[in-house]
Amino acid sequence: MSSGTPDNQAGPAPTAVSGTATAAAVTGTGTGQQWLARYGESLLGVFGSPQRVLVRGAGSLVWDADGKEYLDLLGGIAVNALGHAHPFVTSVISSQLATLGHVSNFFTSPTQIALAEKLLMLSAAPAGSKVFFANSGTEANEAAFKLARAHGKANSVPGGPARTTILALEGAFHGRTMGALALTAKQAYREPFEPMPAGVKHLPFNDVDALRAALDGTVAALIIEPIQGEAGVRPLSPEYLRAARELTTRAGALLILDEVQTGVGRTGDWFAGTAAGITPDAMTLAKGLGGGFPIGALVTFGEAPSQLLSAGQHGTTFGGNPVATAAALATLHVLESQDVLANVRTVGALLADGLARTDGVTEVRAFGLLIGFDLAQPVAAAVVTAALEAGFIINAPRPNTIRLAPPLILTAGQAASFLAALPALIEHASAPQSAEGAIS
Ligand SMILES: *Cc1c(COP(=O)(O)O)cnc(C)c1O
C-alpha cells in the first residue's frame, strides 16, 4: 500500500482535522495494480474484478490511477449526464453540503420541494400528481411495487379474486433488491435467492396479444421499460406502448414506466414514455437524475395513484435529502438552460449514422445517447477490452451487443474519435488471437 509519495503519509491527525482537503488526504495514493490488489482483499466479489481504478474526471474524460486518459462513453452506466466534475453541479452540491446536508424526512427542505415541482413540470404531470424520493433505481421500483399492491388492495372486488399480480416483461431489468428482483426477468440474477416475492408474471416482449390475455381481474399493475437498457437497448414499439396504456386502463391496472435508464434527457426527450405520447400512472427515475449523485424518484400521475400510499406506509432515511435533491436540481437546470437535449439528438444521430456504416456492425438501436449495436460475432467483451486499451470506456450487455450511454454533453468531435477507432477494435477482437485476450 505504499507508493513512496509524500501524499501517502498525509493521513489526518485527529487534532488537526480542519479546513479543505482532497480525498487523497484520507486514502493515500497508489498505482492501479496496488489498488486492485487491495480491492481484492477488501471488497465483496459481486462485481468481479474492476477494469480500472479511476481517480479523476472532467467532462466526458476520466483518468485512471496510472494517469491514462479515457473517453467515457458509458457515463457510469447512463448516470453522468453532465459528465464528470461539472463545475455548476459541483458548486451547488458543495455549497448545499456546506449549508445543510441531511435532515431526515421528519423535516423537509427547499431543494426537495423545488425538485418535486420541477419533475412534475418536466413530465407534464396532471393535477394531483406527486413525487417520492429514494436513493437508487431499485429503491424507486420498490416504491412502485408497493404502490401497485396498494392499488390492488384498494381496487379488488369484494368477495372476488385478490388483485395482487404484477406483470413485467421478459428481458426486464428493474434492480437487485428482492421486490425489484422479482420484477427482473433474468434467471441467473433470481435463482440463487429464491423464493422470490410472489405474484409477479413475466410476459413475452412486445406482444400485445399476450398482454391482453394476461390482464384479468387479478392484475394490479404492468411495469415496463420503454427501452430495455440492460437487455441491450431494446425498444418497445409505439404500438405496444399505446396498447399497454389502453389495456391497463380498461383492466383497472396501473401502468408503471421504469425510466430509470431512459429518463431525464437520455433519449433526447425528457422521458421516453411521455415522448411516445404515454401518460403512465407512475414512473420511476434514478440513474441520470442526480448528474452522478445518488438519487431515485417515483412520480405518481394524477389524483388516484398519488393517494394510494398514506402516512407511514412507505419511507426512507436518506431519500430526498438536501444534497441529493440539490444535485438533481442543478443537473436539470444545466440540461434545460444549455439545451443539452438538442446536443443529445445531434450527437446521438451522428453516432447512429457512423455505427450503421461500420464494418462488423449488423444492427444499431439508437435513441438519443442510449445506443445499442450488434456485432456480427459474439466478441463484444473483447471489443470492450480492446477499447479500454485504446482509451474508450464502453460496455457489453450481451455477448454480441455493445452499449453506449455517454455523458449528454459528449461533443461531435469526441463521437467521431470513437467512430474512427471502432473498426480496428472490432477487427482486433474478431481476430483468432483475441481469444487469449492479447492486445498487441
Ligand atoms: C439501472 C436500472 C435499475 C436499477 O437501478 P439501481 O440504481 O442500480 O438500483 C432499474 N431499472 C432500470 C431500467 C435500470 O436501468
Image (cartoon, rainbow, N blue to C red):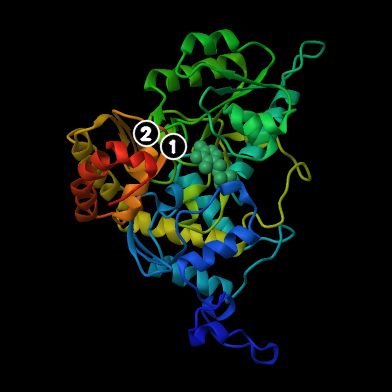
Residue underneath mark 1: 397
Frontmost residue, 130 versus 87: 87
Q: Is residue 402 visible?
A: no
Q: How crowded is mark 2: few (under 14 residues within 10 Å), some or many (20 or more)?
A: many
- The vertical placement of 319 against 348, above or below, is below
Q: Is mark 1 on a helix, strand or loop?
A: strand
Measuring 45% from the left and 58% from the top, which residue is drawn there? 52
Q: In which quarter of the image is ligand 1?
A: top right
Question: Percent position (x, y) of residue 214?
Answer: 59, 11
Instruction: Check whether the beta carbons of the residues at disc 1 and disc 2 lie within 8 A of each other.
Output: yes
Q: Quadrant of residue 338?
A: bottom left
Measuring 34% from the left and 48% from the top, which residue is drawn there? 438
Instruction: From the viewer's perspective, tell me whether residue 373 is left or right of residue 134.
Output: left
- The vertical placement of 174 against 110, above or below, is above
Which label was assigned to residue 401?
2
Which label was assigned to residue 343?
none
